[in-house]
Amino acid sequence: MKADHKQVTQALKTARGQLDGILRMVEADRYCVDISNQLLATGALLKKTNKIVLQAHLQSCVKESFETGTDVDQKISEILKLLDKLVN
């Protein structure tokens, strides 16, 4: 992975902590809207982290593939599959 490991790791640990907190909220039978807000916040953090990882991939792995002419079709296919998942 070419993304900043420290940044990605910290974000994922934060998301894990948020999920643990959400589980405690569910177990404590907290108000649904409060749980939903926490789920949205965690989802937003994961989305932001995914963006960081994908940007690094495009700027390194995909760029290198285009520059060297190796595995270009594979890289394009991978990106198209990811885009399909992101928009659906």
Image: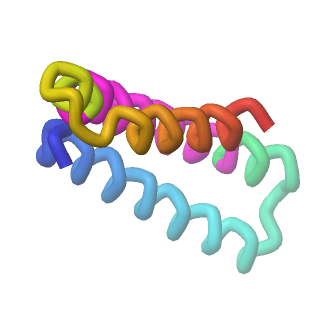
Q: Residue at x 12, y 45 (%)?
A: 6
Q: Residue at x 75, y 53 (%)?
A: 35
Give the magenta part as a residue range: 39-61
In percent of width and height, residue 88 lies at 80, 38
Which color scheme does this rendered protein use?
rainbow
Q: Which residue is outermost to the bottom?
A: 27
Question: Position of 15 compared to 77: left or right?
Answer: left
In percent of width and height, residue 44 lies at 57, 35
As for residue 31 lying within the magenta part, the answer is no
Q: Can you tell which quarter of the image residue 60 is in?
A: top left
Residue 81 shows up from this direction: yes
Pick whichever, 64 or 14, lies toward us: 64
Pick whichever, 2 or 31, lies toward us: 2
Question: Position of 77 compared to 22: left or right?
Answer: left
Q: Residue at x 79, y 63 (%)?
A: 30
Magenta stretch mostly in which secondary structure?
Answer: helix
